[in-house]
Image: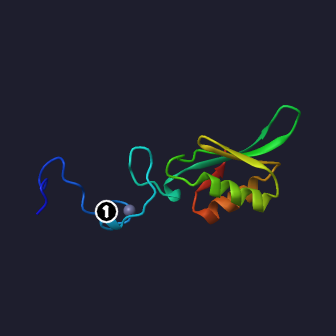
Amino acid sequence: MGLFDGTALQRPVTCPACQKQIDDCHCPRNAEGVPCHPKDQRILVRIEKRPGGRKVTVARGFDPVASDLSAVLREFKSKCGGGGTVREDTVEVQGEHGSMVLKVLLELGYPGRIG
Ligand SMILES: [Zn+2]
């Protein structure tokens, strides 16, 4: 019996996302501490024009706390062969790579769509 059993301070015993004991859970969590997996996120992909007519492929809508965005960027850069950057909930890669970016997102477990 725990000290706080039956009170508001009692911790949940299992993770709602993976059903493991909380101490064994390694789910990524968002800023509120709620489990947030790639499959729980909805990523919008679109081609945007930058000043000078340069085109970039932008994937927007990541949870920036729960997601390893530098790993996403690394994958985008290696598959699309261009430079890129991470800002807040967005990962972008230089050039027009809509279908490749969608494919990489899918491989990483993120549901993405053109939008
Ligand atoms: Zn979990």
Quick check: 32 left or right of 114?
Answer: left
> Residue at position x 23%, y 55% from top?
11
**What's the residue type where badge 1 is placed?**
Ile
Quick check: 43 left or right of 14?
Answer: right
Q: Quadrant of the N terminus?
A: bottom left
x and y, in percent, of residue 3 in the image:
12, 56
Quadrant hosting residue 88: top right
> Residue at position x 72%, y 57% from top?
76
* In front of the other: 54 or 73: 73
Question: How many labels were placed on the picture?
Answer: 1
Disc 1 on helix, strand or loop? helix
Above or below, 26 against 60 in this view is: below
Tell whether circle 1 marks a residue whose Cβ is less than 8 angstroms from ligand 1: yes
> Residue at position x 39%, y 44% from top?
32
Quick check: 106 left or right of 94?
Answer: left
Q: Quadrant of the C terminus?
A: top right
* In front of the other: 67 or 60: 67
Looking at the picture, the colour scheme in use is rainbow
Quick check: 94 left or right of 106?
Answer: right
Quadrant hosting residue 87: top right
Above or below, 50 against 63 in this view is: above
* In front of the other: 66 or 97: 66
The outermost residue toward the top is 51
Q: Where does label 1 land, which residue?
A: 22
x and y, in percent, of residue 82 in the image:
82, 53
Q: Quadrant of ligand 1?
A: bottom left
Quadrant hosting residue 99: bottom right
